[in-house]
Amino acid sequence: MRENLTRWFYQAMGFQNGLARTQRIESISKATKLNKTEPKEESKPADQMDISTDVKYISWLKEHPSALSSFEEMMDAAKGKWVVVFLDYDGTLSPIVNDPERAFMSDMMRSAVGDVAKLYPTAIISGRSRQKVYGFVKLDDVFYAGSHGMDIMGPAIQASCYDGKYQSKALDQKGNELTVFQPAHDFLPSIEKMLNELEETTSEINGALVEDNRFCISVHYRHVLQEDLGLLEKKVQALVAKYPGFHLTRGKKVIEIRPSIKWNKGDALVYLLETLGFTNSSGVLPIYIGDDKTDEDAFKVLKCRGQGYPIIVSSNPRDTLASYSLRDPSEVLSFLIRLARWGEVSAV
């Protein structure tokens, strides 16, 4: 019964890998029944564990349906509205990799994001430094918000409700005027000191990587031995204790040091919507796609506004405020391609 349910689900959703795995499990099961002398194993085969995981994922999808299978329904509600697209970078536009310096997006993904940006205002909001994200993406028709939204290069309009001393004029690569908003600018001197101290104090721990993300510092421990993790964490905590204006957050195999200001990706989303002219507008439909815990702040904003589509990128069930889901960057690519095509047809 459960195998039939799983096969039906994968056929309906187009997940051929899952269907193949289900068929493989059924073949193993039949072969085991034919072989009466096969000894019983205490532990469950890996494929049966996969089925258990898949069943949990199927149940989770009832609350967070695929944005691909729900695309037509989602876009029906977008008719007559201004679509604005927000994207995380790592784990969304590029896969999570062992070396953060090599988190390259594919040419196909770059092309899809570029096509979307030609049709809708598009922004990438990342924990990386703004300059680093631009170096990966290399698209000039996109707005960039680095350091979890604490370094925004957005529309030329300056938002009057935000402190003017943190807003300045700038030009993009094409000479277009933009506004740079950096609400954590006062913390830069301390961040530079912390960065130097952290690089020195963690140098003895093999595999530890300190990344300068302009307004926050990331300490990657993906390659750190298990027995060294406690020491690394103590060193980071001891450093932060010397700087009361900062706090720690955690991501995927990373500890981040961030200024203690009331600002996150959700605030960056609101700021960009306001500078785009959509303050309290009922005619806008924001789409936010991200995979990280920090993206939940943006999901929360959309939920509170009661508009738009927060989309989580995850192949595993997890607690989230997102309304829809995509499994991985390859499904993000498919969604963006469909979104661009839908926009082109709607514009005719």
Image (tube, rainbow, N blue to C red):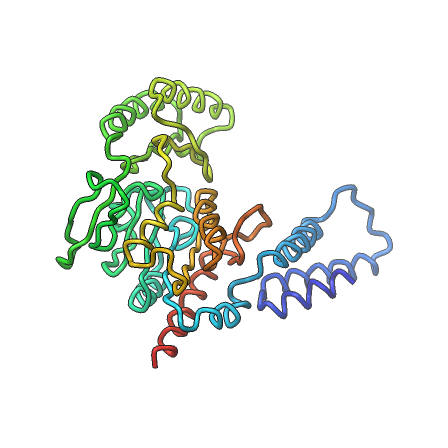
Horizontal side, residue 283 vs residue 25: left or right: left
182 relative to 88, above or below: above
48 relative to 3, above or below: above
65 relative to 251, above or below: below
Q: Give percent across and percent down for residue 195.
A: 28, 27
Horizontal side, residue 329 vs residue 195: left or right: right
Q: Give percent across and percent down for residue 256.
A: 39, 33
314 relative to 188, above or below: below
Which residue occupies the extreme left position in the image? 175
Q: How many marks?
A: 0
Horizontal side, residue 23 vs residue 148: left or right: right
Q: Give percent across and percent down for residue 4.
A: 74, 66
Q: Give percent across and percent down for residue 60.
A: 63, 54
Q: In the rendered image, which quarter contains the N terminus?
A: bottom right
Q: Which residue lies at the image location 74% right of the left edge and 46% below the top edge?
A: 44
> Which of the 4 quarters of the picture holds residue 143?
bottom left
Instruction: Please name whichever residue, 185 or 302, is drawn nearer the observer in this view of the structure.
Output: 302
Which residue occupies the extreme bottom position in the image? 348
Q: Which residue lies at the image location 43% right of the left edge and 35% below the top edge?
A: 254
Instruction: Please name whichever residue, 250 or 296, is drawn nearer the observer in this view of the structure.
Output: 296
Q: Which residue lies at the image location 43% right of the left edge and 70% below the top edge?
A: 338
Q: In the rendered image, which quarter contains the C terminus?
A: bottom left
